[in-house]
């Protein structure tokens, strides 16, 4: 609610605005009456005039929102307003046989479909940027770090490949959920009673009109989909935030391996600072998605045929989850698309730590000769001597390995294992047809 | 973000709007320069012109929000805009020695103070309504229900007294936190270095100007207060939602012991329905507060002297927590202030269940005569017989108790234990001086 | 941690116990060395003796847990213990080229696979019970209730069908996730460097040995799967809890439409009470799953190649999510498998409300004759008159409808719309081949 | 549930074990009957034999837990077992007039009181270690870092002082809550009906026996306290985790300013690594507390006089919150008590960044001479030149400042502002009498 312009691109904010919701609700009323005309439940000529009236221009978005307070939902005042706009005999066929939740839920799916497209676009951008980095830096040596300690060498390409796989998976899940967004039409309590024998037929046409999936049964009080959507958006946003965290960690003054694009991030009083602003925004957005997803995920345990409060809490939570997920993706896309990578510094950091990062390799080299237990003892001793003397692990191992072995042992470029294959696997996963 | 007008009174929405935040930020900049003038850090005449310039009318709220995207916070563009408005030599003293987080955090406290007052007013209204119900229905018999089953008799007054105590406690906690809202002034990394030796002096004047509490040390990366505020708002909102749930349960068609005020809650197609709209809104609001509070509570584990993302996620979460807490309280206040209580139906429901609700008393009466184990067996037998025959527990106990005993045993009005004393205790707690 | 026996069937508790984890870890070490032998990385005869040693009987489960404190994970002490058991030259090939996280993550997948089978069995039981109820009560009339108010008639079969669809969907999602559980093998920082050129080959054999899916790249710091699993378990548990809530609401003293099986739920002092114990347990379990899922879902934003704390928090959270999801399903299965349904009471409640539940039908009947607006006014008037006089809606409509129309209007059995078709659709969905 | 020995000291685990809960429940039954004897509700000699029987040795902890499944709580089987142990006439006075929730809730408070003492001890240890570091490193220069970038100089003492203040505040909140833990005694539905006119008297004696606070009214369905406790434990644990994160960040290979104590943290295959194990454990624990606190905080919106599921979910969540909070504190205490601080490296890092960390000071120095706007431009230019040339900010400012000014400008030791005063304020806050 506060300073959203900092976090969410305007296009995405617009896609989940009250105006967008009400437009979607009108689209739903139009689809409903069209479906009912097709099924012969509503006379075609009356249906036509209702469908015609479902135009956002005829309605006062703010007034409908405010009027929703007394009914506890925005559909009731919208229907009232629509009946007034329509007038005459046709007014009686507005919203015919439907319940408020039918309209709001179906509209929520339309809003989600549109917003998910935008979120998906941003995620595609993130994936493309990750893929480009993975390919370009397939062989760019850097330290692999576990628990924030240098562990063994890796490549920046593999790091980006790891990001890529997470983003592609998150994107695939959202795409799948988007393709299965269901229409909602159950009437007052899920039986479509007011439509007599035509309910199922109308529901079929209705889903087709909206190009939404026809659900097995109305899902007024089966909110698993909302929870799944919330969770998937949270995973997507968090996958972006994970990239942001890695970038910001690499960007630390003492690490300096990457930099976010220049320009943003200026500090008002510290001219030298280039803050990881995009990363921070992505992380902040992911935290907001998580909060919103929690609201959606806690909304399943509801009363009978319609929830008392849990449903009403969904609308804003869904909008927030969509908007901030888009915000996280857009921010990290911006970061990655013009990320400055300092390969020299990566190599420097790898070597500066005195060779410790190669200790695993040394251990295995020695183990082949003296057995694992002896090797472990020898390397531990060398590590301790190096720490004590302030020297390098390499120097303190001079007695244990030949000069030639030392060269091999401390060459990170030959201790990458399957890094390149993993990069290639990630790129294939990203580029696979029909993804 | 969506259909907030349904959930939050306009006054409270306004108190947490971007405009309100920016007004608060300007108030903070004014207090800063005034404090610096008092401490001799900024020449008084320049300070005066800066303080003068801190008027919301001179700034474009939306533009500042949008510009905040590149810095990752709204203070940087506001300071830039303020410097432009001030111009000349004085411009160099705008925001002197402060950091963006000083401004935003202090503003957050001002926003909280104002919004907490409004939330508090609503809670006072809720408490007053609870107290009135407790007093009026001190002796109104109804079924006490545990795990949704009738257990033993209670009074509606005691139920309302229970609500009252929860609301008063939640209110007290919010009041306490409100009285301890701290100013924030630490400069770039919490040392106030740019103010030389005058930092602590300025910080003292600054807190006094804003009438906020001076913290022990800057709290840029100590966010316990935010978590506490979130938790307290969540407890307050949930305490309102608990009332809403009880009301809606009592309002069930089959129970019918209370009704929310007429008017709202109309169903568009079911004229007989009077939905518990206020209760649903309160519950929905509480769920949103919980989501927002979760964001605030997860924001403590932050990096060094300023968080990477967790801080930036707080602004909207704080606004949401405040707004929806106010929404929950306002909704339930509306419900309680014109709640229709049907004492006749309460008594009817108590008696309709065939006397089962008195089984505990019967057990204890019998136990005095035949011992606990025998009594338990006897009553269990009677319950079973009643269930089998479809008769009442009273009838099936006719052989175990005398006619006189039966009258006593099944008179709920004489089996209220300490109910009245508890009501009185709750009212005293509510009315105690200096609450 | 507390009184788990109340909530979780022993078999499921056992499947996520420390012992089960350590057994799984040993299975992983065995698979690793077998894979390495196949790839020629470890001499076959040494591999054989290692694989042989991977038997839970040789290890002290508690001691390994306690020893894990100093390494921050249980794999390190297990590997040390395994090396001791193996001894000699082979000891150097124990855990060869792997990292602790490889072992714990792969073990987590094995534990999940086993526990998900048990959870799935319980969910199948729930689904079967729902399906039986849906089929048996396809035509059992009852009130549909929205916002806890009677709305229009429905059938108990449709209510059960709604539960069924939710359970089947949740089950399908868990089954899908179960079929895609991945192995984990990346070595120290995800490159499998210690295996030289054989890493990918070993990883392939390793996944095959464990019958787990081979991931695109190691997922040490890509925890989307864990979040998805948590979310899916939470949805499954909450779907059970939703049933529990409905059952408990129907079981209310004043509603009395269903009863949980006799026996359990006895109150110590109120012999008449039959508490909805199974429902309460299911709801409690779902709340615990939600808490655990939250931990899993918040674990994505992690540092570089291995998380600092987020990973370590997963183990217990995963166990809890699995165990309590199983607990929720088992509890609600028990409830449904011997649920007593009182169709007479359902009909009684439907009719007792004075016909209000038919007001939608009346509205549509009248609307056909006098237009929607007039009809709405007429019914609203009748509702008001009925409320005032204490009479029924039917009586107060006597002037507006003919006697014949009145009979039709107030016959709930002819106002079920598509209820039966929805029941059939749900049953087909449940029974579809290959589900 | 999984590998708790890694995370939680044994003493704390024991304090929240099923055994500890059942011991507490027996203590509650003893206090109840003693109070009833004092009030004359139970004959003194019978009370004595009941009180006598309340000894853990007579009960089978596991069997009671298992038996609790059918009643949905552990009190019912414990009471049954206690009645059997007591036998005879006295058996009828066991648990007289109380309800299961009275016993479990009061026991929860006893368990909390004991566990909070242990958690508090650990937090005192953390505070003492922070205070020692703050005092010892009051003048130890290091870089202040915001958004993970070096900002301006600070001292390690001030960083520790910030930790200290957060810990002391969290500790104070827990102590306050501990001092207000309430007894619970309401009987079947909160009226103490079975005690006739003596309920309030008994409740008073009961609270006194247990040395718990007497609540205004029974709080069976007012769970604000549980939420507050959860939140406070979460804040305490997260405050420990924040220290852990800072430590681990400082411990990064490239930063190297502190080290966790030697010994733990050994990697099985990378002899050079010294993992920040204690920090990781503290962070993991805090995440678990957060999950458990979420369960407690979501438990307020409950039904009527006793919750359906929310209450039952509290027991384990409370135990978890207490245990992992203790685990977080114990882990970070261990880290801090033998933390190795490398002041030389701190200074080195401060200087190595090329003087950028002093840019704010330079800006203010220049501003005094040429005005703020000009100064900002000049410093920005110098920063850019330094970045381009790879030189230092100091060198590129040689034309703007005199040699003397340059010395002053780039001496971090004279740009600490109020750092020392803040350290002193934190220490005073810690040492204030009666804290």
Image (tube, coloured by chain):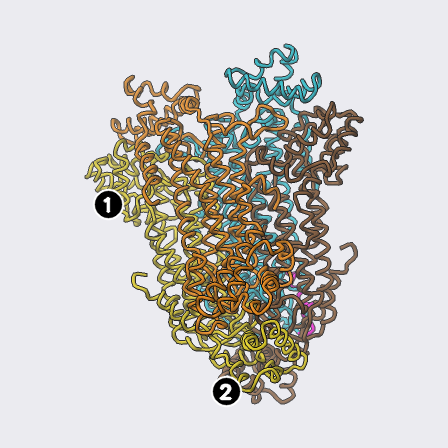
Chain colours: A cyan, B yellow, C brown, D orange
- Please tell me whether mark 1 sits on a helix, a strand or a loop: helix
State the residue position of label 2.
Answer: C389
Q: Chain of mark 2?
A: C
Q: Position of residue C10 (x, y in %)?
A: 69, 53
Q: Residue furthest right?
A: C45
Q: Is residue A169 left or right of residue C86?
A: left
Is A202 contained in the magenta span? Answer: yes
State the residue position of label 1.
Answer: B52
In this view of the protein, which residue sits in the foreground, A329 or C241? Answer: C241
Q: Is residue A255 visible?
A: yes
Q: Chain of mark 1?
A: B
Q: Residues within 10 Å of mark 1 (few under 14, many from 20)?
A: few
Q: Position of residue A320 (x, y in %)?
A: 51, 52
Q: Position of residue D15 (x, y in %)?
A: 53, 48
Q: Which mark is residue D88?
A: none
Q: Residues within 10 Å of mark 2 (few under 14, many from 20)?
A: few
Disc 1 and disc 2 in contact, CB within 8 angstroms: no
Q: Quadrant of residue A36?
A: bottom right
Q: Is residue C311 left or right of residue B172?
A: right
Q: Please tell me whether residue B122 is drawn above or below residue B386 in the rendered image.
A: above
Q: Which residues are magenta?
A: A196-209
- Please tell me whether mark 2 sits on a helix, a strand or a loop: helix
């Amino acid at each position: 609610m506060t300073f959203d312009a900092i976090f969410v691109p305007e296009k995405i904010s617009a896609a989940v605005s009250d105006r967008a919701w009400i437009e979607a609700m009108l689209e739903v009323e139009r689809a409903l009456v069209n479906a009912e005309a097709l099924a012969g439940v509503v006379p075609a000529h009356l249906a036509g005039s209702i469908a015609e009236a479902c135009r956002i221009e005829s309605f006062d978005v703010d007034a409908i929102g405010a009027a929703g307070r007394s009914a506890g939902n925005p559909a009731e005042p919208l229907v009232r307003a629509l009946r007034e706009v329509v007038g005459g005999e046709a007014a009686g066929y507005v919203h015919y046989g439907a319940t408020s939740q039918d309209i709001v839920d179906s509209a929520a799916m339309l809003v989600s479909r549109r917003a998910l497209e935008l979120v998906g676009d941003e995620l595609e951008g993130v994936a493309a940027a990750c893929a480009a980095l993975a390919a370009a830096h397939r062989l760019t040596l850097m330290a692999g770090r576990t628990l924030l300690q240098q562990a063994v060498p890796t490549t920046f390409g593999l790091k980006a490949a790891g990001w890529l796989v997470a983003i592609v998976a998150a994107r695939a899940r959202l795409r799948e959920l988007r393709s299965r967004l269901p229409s909602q039409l159950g009437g007052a309590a899920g039986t479509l009673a007011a439509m007599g024998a035509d309910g199922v037929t109308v529901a079929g046409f209705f889903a087709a009109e909206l190009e939404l999936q026809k659900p097995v049964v109305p899902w007024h009080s089966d909110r698993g989909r909302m929870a799944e959507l919330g969770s998937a958006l949270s995973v997507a946003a968090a996958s972006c935030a994970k990239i942001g965290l890695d970038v910001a960690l690499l960007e630390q003054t003492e690490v300096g391996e990457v930099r976010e694009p220049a320009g943003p991030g200026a500090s008002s009083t510290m001219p030298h600072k280039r803050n990881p602003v995009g990363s921070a925004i992505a992380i902040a957005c992911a935290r907001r998605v998580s909060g919103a997803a929690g609201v959606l995920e806690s909304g399943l345990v509801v009363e009978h045929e319609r929830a008392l409060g849990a449903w009403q809490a969904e609308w804003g939570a869904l909008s927030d989850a969509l908007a901030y997920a888009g915000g996280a993706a857009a921010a990290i896309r911006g970061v990655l698309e013009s990320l400055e990578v300092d390969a020299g510094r990566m190599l420097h950091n790898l070597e500066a730590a005195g060779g410790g990062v190669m200790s695993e390799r040394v251990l295995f080299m020695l183990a082949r000769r003296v057995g694992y237990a002896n090797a472990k003892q020898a390397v531990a001793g060398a590590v301790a001597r190096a720490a004590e003397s302030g020297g390098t692990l390499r120097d303190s191992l001079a007695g244990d390995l030949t000069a030639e072995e030392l060269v091999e042992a401390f060459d990170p470029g030959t201790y990458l294992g399957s890094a390149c294959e993993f990069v290639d696997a990630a790129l294939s996963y990203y580029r696979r047809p029909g993804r």
